[in-house]
Structure formats: structure tokens, C-alpha cells
Image (cartoon, rainbow, N blue to C red):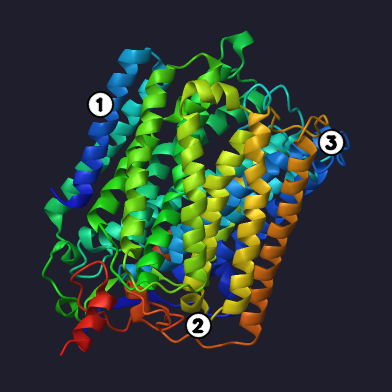
Amino acid sequence: MSTAAALPVPGPRVGLLGWLTTTNHKHIGILYMTTTLGFFALAGIMALLIRADLTVPNHPIVGRQTYAELFTLHGTGMIFLVIAPFGLGLANYILPLQIGAPDMAYPRLNALSYWLFLLGGLVVMSGLLTRDGAAAAGWVAYAPLSTTGSPGAGMDLWIVGVLMVSASSIMTAINLIATTVLYRAPGMIMWRIPVFCWDMVVTSLIILMAFPPLAATLAMLLIDRRLGGHAFDPSQGGSAVVYQHLFWFFGHPEVYVMVLPYFGMITEIIPVFSRKPVFGYTAFVLTTLAIAGLSMAVWAHHMFTTGAVVNPFFSAMSLLIAVPTGIKYVNWIGTMWRGAIVFPTAMLFAVGFLLNFLIGGVTGVMIASPPIDFWAEDTYFIVAHMHYVLGGGSLFALFAAVYYWFPKITGVMLRERWGRLQFWLVFVGFNATFWPMHLLGLWGMQRRVVTYPDLPGWHAMNLIASLGSAVLGLGVLVFLWNLWVSLRDRVPAGPDPWGGYTLEWATTSPPPEFNFETLPPIHSERPVFDLRRSRNAP
Amino acid sequence: MNTTQGILLGSAAFALVVGAIYWFVSYESAGALMLLTMAVGLALAAAYLALLRRRASLAADQRDVRPSDARDEAVGVFASHSVWPPVLALGCAVGLTGLIYGWWLAVLGAAGVTAALVGLVRDDRAARSR
């Protein structure tokens, strides 16, 4: 054991002022995660309203404009304000701990990232308070729907808010890369950093490649709307198709910004609860890099039906991406194979991730083929596919991560009994909500419609989906109850309740201000596992 | 060349190759330019790391170094608190919404941003002098 000192700059430690002015990575991580929880509740309520609206055919409960605002803000909220930033928030807390660093490389930039994220999210949602309502052009905000088609201030607020969130993500990405490159503990070469850190480094690289085009696109959109620009106006020499190119050059890599961190999270969880090291560490890292590279070259598979892109090129690249993703399944199953598997709630959610993400992956391969995509485009099949990837995948991994790292962050355990109940409610509710949408899509039901005709089977499938969403919502309420109960009647966790492998489990729960008094020697990506084994050796 | 540089250069080469293939199958300029920009950006980052590496080596990049070898060595200076990041973010939010609701808001936001930037620089100097 040894020490490595950090030189802190003192300031107020507690109270509201302490939280407002904090630059400590753990506090900022907690702020990120609790903020995403707030936006998750808001976007989730919008989803329940959407499902309530679609329960019965020909009987919408909200108007077309309100419905469009709901699905726009639901998508924007879940994508920009929940799934992607939760990964960044957890990385804020966990990554410096896992590499043995005292903080992030740029603490004040880190704080700025958080405040830009929070205020950006509030600016997006503030559109609901404007006279003409919030943005209603979908989360992709295609021109001309987002230019001449949306004259109200809500659309402008959406653009400004998302611009701020994208700037925040870019800053966090710079910080995560700099921290990992510069502040690893002595002896922790890059090929010894934990898988979650690898996933966050690669995710950060994707952000640095993909988010600047988004920021530029939003700036052009704002100029078109407010300053008389014509970048996306074909009647003045602009191009609406270029908007799609620019947006999806961000939009598809963004899918991996929302998925790779969660791959990393469950790859930390599965080995610990299988009582084995991760199977194929090097292959896992290389396939993550392969996915990142390929993710930058598949953007126009979202544009197959425009007739303005080379479909065979994008189809081939999209199909290729299934190969490294499939190898990851070999990693995960190989890790569990012949392991002494135990199933606390975190592991249940990790296995739930494997099952649901597989379904989302298979339907992704299907729609990577243009003939099938032409059939499924803009139907509920696409809605089902993306929810199995981002909801069944990322959201399940998110819950797994909360159950796994909550004891480290708070020093107390979440209740396993409530956790198991939550898992089954969320698992059943999720599949009941989104599985019927595959059938509805294949039967031709369009997405983004406020109501639908009473065609054979449509009412039954929509009813099942709506009931499923209620069960899913109940599962989330159980989760909130579990948080409340566990924080009220505290069961101390101790420094390492799971028998963890990585460095965060070598310090107290919660860790001290600059994380470590001492560090163990580092000979692999699992130094705590190595230390435990050397102590147990005869 | 270390691992980080290798990853950046490998990714740059990938973007260059895919960008070239894409250009010759599509002659579509927006995507080809974005892939080319990606390649150049990644190559620049790799070159910068190579320059840094010539000036300093990291204990973390050495396989056989133990944490005990860095005993009592200062890792860096880390600010615990600063009021300026939330002020800067608020200035950005107010300034940008000024584009929607009126230039007076933009001016107000710019004042907030300026004050926060000055404050951050002063914070940084004070921290380093300590």
C-alpha cells in the first residue's frame, strides 16, 4: 500500500452553498444523477400520457398539438437529459475512483458542464410555459418542420437548450479523456483500466466527433429561424436533406453514447456476481473501439427512404456493426459460464439487459436491410426497436448500476426485496408495453399519430401496451420508494459489500474528499480482486 | 507510440479509409467532409499527445511502477469549490435566450459570462499561488 497526495483548494463544505459551488467530482456525479432522475420522472409522465391517449382507437384525450409536444419532449428528455447524461454522471463519480485519481482533471470545467446540462434541460422544458407551447417537431427536429413549421418560441427554446446540453457533453468528454490519460494511478497502464473506463473513454471520443456537428446544425437552425438564414430552406438554395445528414452524423453515434457506457456498467457487474474475471478483456475493448468507429459511418441508414443516399454502403456498414456487438455477448456469456452466479437485484437487471438488448439488436439488423426498412419506416416497429435498445438495454443497465454502486455512493444498501419486486414489475411492464408495438408496426400503424382507426387487432395490442406502461410506471414508483426507505432506515454497506474487483471498492463508502488514503499495487484491471487473492493465498 | 496515440491514429486512419470509400461510392460532399474532418481532428490529437510525451512521461504508463514509488508526491491542484461555473452557465442560458426574447437579455447574459470568466481566471491564479 502507498499514498499519493492531492493538494485541495478549500471552500464551503456543506449546505446549499456547498452544493451550488462544488467542483468535487463525487458531488457533481450525484448532482448529475439526481437531475437525470428528475428529468426521467418528467419524461416518464409524458410517456404515460402518450400511452393513455392511445389506449382506445378514435378517442384521443389530448389535441394533435399537445400530443406532438408530448412525444417531442419525451424523446428529447429521455435521450438528451436522462440516458446519455446518466452515463456521464456515473462516470463523473466512478471513473476517477476506478483509476485511482483524486478528482477529475478539470474540476471547474466539470462543474460548468453540470450547470450547462441542468439549465439547458430546463430551457428545453420551459417551452411548455410559452403561449404557443413547447417544441413539437420530434426529437430529430427535421427542417422544414422545425423552421417554417414551428413558429413559436418553444422551438427556439428547444434549440438553445439542446445546444447547451451538447456543449456540456463536449466539456465532460474532454474531462473524462484528460482524466483517464493523465491521472491514472502509477502502474495502471491503459490496458489495465477497468472496462467501464474504457467504455467511457471511447464514448467520450464519439462525443468529440459527433456533438460538434450537432452544435453547428442547431446554430444554423437558430440562424435560419431568428436571423434570416436559409441553410435548410430549399427555396432559397438551402437543403433540408443536408439537415438530415448533419443531424444523423450526430444522431446515430449518439445511440452508442447512450449504449456503450451501459455496456461498461454491466461488464463491471456480471463478473463480480459470477465470481470470475471478465472473459476476454482485450476483445471487449477492441470491439468497443470497432463499434465506435463503425458508428461514425452508418448515419444515413436513418435516411434510406429519402432516396438521396447510397443505401448499399450504409446497409453494409450497419450490418457490420452487429459483429463486434455479438462478440460482446460472447464476453458476457463467457464470463457467466461456469461461474458461481448469484442474483442480487443488480445482477437481475444486468441479465434483463442482456435479454432485452438482444431483441433490440436483432430488430436493428432487420432494419439495416433497406427492403425491410422501407416497410417499417415511421411505423411502431421502429418505436419498438429503439425502445428495446434504449429502454430494455440502457434503462435496465441504469437500474443495475444504481443497485450496484448506490452502497458506494451513499454508504447504505438498497433493499433487495423492493429491488426484486421492482425488477419483475419493470421487466414484465416493459415487455408488455413494447413487444406489441412490433406487431402494430408490421400491421402498418404509423408512429407519432394522436389516434388510430379500429382495425383488427390494433385496439387489443394498444390496450396491452398501455396496461404494460402502467405496470412499468408502478415499477419506477417502487424504485423511488426503495430509495426513500433505504435512505431513511439506513443499513450500512461497508467499503465493499459485493466483493468488488476494481479500485473504488478499496476505499470507504462514501469515499473521502480526495478518494484514497492508500492505493494497492496494480497488476491488472481488477486490483482489489488481485489483492484479495494474494491475501487468501497460502 | 503509446496506447492512446495508437487508438487516435488508428481511428483517424479508419475515418480516412471509410471517407474515401464513401466519396467514391456516393460523391456526396457533406458526409465525406465530415469523415475527413474526423480523421484530421483525431490525427491532430495524436500529434499533440506525441509532443506532450516528448516533454514528460507518466508513471501510469510504466507497467512495473507501484503506487508506493509515488509516495507523498503531489498529484495536482484540485479546486474544491467555485461560484463561477454556475454563474457562467447562467450567463450562457440568459444570453442565448436573448436571441429569442430580445437583445437586452443577450447583453445581460454577456455581462454574466464576462464576470464569470474573469472570476475563473482570478480563482485559478489564487489557487496556483497557494
Q: Residue at x 35, y 67 (%)?
A: A271
Residue corresponding to mark 1? B17
A453 is higher (above) or lower (below) than B54: above
Residue closest to the eye, A228 or B57: B57
Which of the two discs, 3 and 2, labels the residue nearer the N terminus? 3
Q: Residue at x 62, y 38 (%)?
A: A438
Q: Is residue A512 visible?
A: yes
Residue corresponding to mark 3? A57
**Label 3, label 2: how many angstroms apart (C-alpha)?**
49 Å
Q: Chain of mark 2?
A: A
SS at circle 2 = loop
Q: Residue at x 46, y 17 (%)?
A: A309
Q: Chain of mark 3?
A: A
Number of marks in the image? 3
Residue closest to the eye, A164 or A34: A34
Q: Residue A411 shows which numbered tag? A: 2
A208 is higher (above) or lower (below) than A34: above
* Label 3 crowd (10 A; few <14 / some 14-19 / many >=20): some
Q: Amino acid at mark 2?
A: Gly
